[in-house]
Image: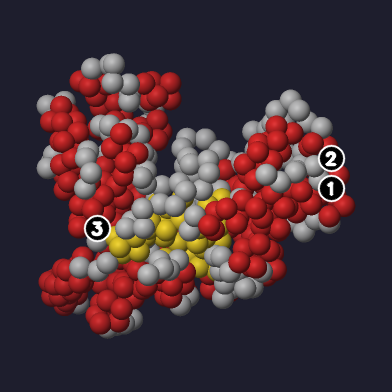
């Protein structure tokens, strides 16, 4: 018995390794459509003069803070007035602790594959910095996004641009947020809205008209999806609230000249919550009218603070029921609420689940989640990759990790007889490009 199981397990290994390697090859050749990016425009990136700690700042620095790097010190590490070697000496003990996390892996892959630095340490930091500076010129995006990562294009959330601006169509299609009109906070915000939209915001109807105007301005710049990151500031349960209740909140808000009301540790006590909830539903109706898909941040916020429970995907269930014609894209596999997004994606024809950010948040969780989701829902509803980075090198590295995760999960499925190798390649194509291209088509 013992000998038999030993033999069968040793025989099984080479077959699996060959299968995995063959799937890796196939999946390595596939093009990607990225469901979500925060990449700077190439000219912004070049004039920002990125260096080693620029790449570290997104998101590896957060894991260093988690390992004990004081946040105030973390903020100084990008300061070019402090010699690079000194900054590295401060960072290194925390890097040693964090280098194996998903963020750490992405950073190491980027440095090795793109800059030829096998190991970043005290003796290589200056070379690493020099290599990054050397490549920081026009052509960087073509080389890294198109040639190396095989990313045809990505859905860009350029939240740092106040006004909507048409991005470079070689690399991006545009997602824009309406969150500002959902959670205005104070009278000054209403005044700013009037300024950018030219609409008088003196009533609930005015606020809605301003939101509509902003949407039209964004569509004119090529917007193809609505994005929401309200989970960073409040619970994403949006009750159905009457016009009258929302109007009462609006009147109180319009009298609040002093700035945003004080938040609480849980971000749950929202003085104008009725107005916010009502406006969220208005945004959904606008998305429905314009046929725009809606991308929603669910799961843990980025950074080292925030209230995770506010981000539960299950809070959104009424929204999926109310707007069956709107396609919803639930971000970050709801991590850690992976099973919530899985069951929502399984139940609702209009709900898709999205692995953007997920392969670097926790590569192992992403693999387990993908395996379970493939068992639970049609694979046409799973968006398998979104880089979710500000810097192209890290989006490239994330894509490497996503391809590896998808290959490993599908190799296991083929091994188990769940599908054939040809099926696996068809699924990988859908996960990496087909599903995202269907939801977020690039015209022309
Ligand atoms: Zn994001």
- Identified at 25% across, 82% down, the residue is 422
Q: Position of residue 289 (x, y in %)?
A: 65, 68
Viewer-closest of 215 and 195: 195
Residue corresponding to mark 2: 251
Q: Are marks 2 and 1 in contact (CB under 8 Å)?
A: yes
Viewer-closest of 43 and 234: 43
Which quadrant holds residue 66? top left
Secondary structure at badge 3 equals helix
Q: Quadrant of the N terminus?
A: bottom left
Q: Is residue 107 left or right of residue 433?
A: left
Secondary structure at badge 2 equals helix
Secondary structure at badge 1 equals helix
Q: Position of residue 30 (x, y in %)?
A: 25, 69
Residue 216 seen by the camera: yes
Label at residue 247: 1
Residue corresponding to mark 3: 146
Q: Quadrant of the C terminus?
A: bottom left
Look at the numbered disc 3 and say if its residue's Cβ is closer than 8 Å to ligand 1.
Answer: no
Viewer-closest of 86 and 142: 142
Work out whether mark 3 precedes mark 1 in sequence or the reverse, and give the earlier one: 3
Q: Give the crowd class for mark 3: few <14, some 14-19, many >=20 residues within 10 Å.
A: some
Mark 2 and mark 3: Cα distance apart in space: 50 Å
């Amino acid at each position: 018995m013992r000998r038999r199981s030993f033999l069968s397990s040793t025989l099984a290994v080479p077959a699996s390794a060959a299968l995995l390697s063959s799937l890796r090859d196939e999946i390595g050749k596939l093009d990607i459509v990225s469901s979500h990016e925060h990449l700077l425009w190439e000219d912004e990136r070049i004039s920002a003069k990125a260096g080693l700690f620029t790449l570290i700042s997104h998101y590896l620095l957060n894991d260093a803070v988690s390992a004990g790097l004081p946040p105030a010190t973390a903020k100084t590490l990008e300061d070019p007035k402090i010699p690079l070697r000194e900054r590295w000496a401060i960072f290194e003990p925390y890097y040693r602790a964090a280098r194996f996390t998903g963020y750490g892996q992405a950073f190491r892959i980027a440095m090795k594959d793109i800059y030829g630095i096998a190991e970043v340490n005290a003796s290589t930091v200056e070379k690493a910095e020099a290599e990054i500076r050397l490549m920081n010129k026009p052509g960087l995006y073509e080389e890294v996004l198109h040639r190396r990562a095989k990313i045809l294009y990505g859905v860009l959330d350029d939240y740092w641009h106040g006004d909507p601006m048409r991005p470079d169509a070689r690399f991006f299609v545009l997602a824009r947020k309406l969150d500002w009109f959902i959670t205005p906070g104070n009278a000054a915000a209403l005044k700013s809205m009037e300024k950018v939209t030219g609409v008088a915001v003196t009533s609930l109807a005015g606020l809605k008209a301003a939101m509509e105007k902003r949407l039209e301005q964004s569509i004119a710049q090529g917007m193809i999806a609505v994005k929401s990151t309200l989970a960073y500031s409040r619970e994403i349960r949006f009750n159905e609230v009457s016009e009258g209740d929302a109007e009462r909140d609006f009147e109180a808000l319009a009298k609040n000249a002093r700035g945003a009301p004080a938040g609480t540790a849980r971000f749950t006590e929202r003085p104008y919550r009725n107005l916010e909830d009502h406006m969220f539903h208005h945004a959904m109706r606008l998305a429905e009218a314009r046929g725009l898909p809606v991308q929603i941040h669910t799961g843990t916020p980025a950074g080292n603070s925030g209230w995770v429970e506010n981000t539960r995907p299950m809070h959104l269930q009424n929204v999926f029921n109310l707007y069956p014609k709107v396609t919803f894209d639930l971000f970050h596999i709801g991590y850690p609420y992976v099973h919530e997004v899985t069951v929502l994606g399984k139940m609702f024809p209009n709900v898709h689940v999205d692995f953007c950010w997920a392969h670097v948040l926790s590569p192992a969780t992403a693999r387990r989640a993908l395996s379970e989701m493939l068992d639970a829902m049609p694979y046409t509803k799973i968006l398998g990759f979104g880089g979710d980075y500000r810097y192209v090198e890290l989006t490239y590295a994330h894509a490497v990790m996503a391809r590896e995760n998808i290959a490993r999960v599908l190799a296991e499925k083929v091994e188990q007889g769940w599908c054939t190798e040809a099926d696996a390649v068809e699924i990988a194509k859908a996960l990496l490009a087909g599903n995202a291209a269907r939801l977020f088509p690039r015209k022309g």
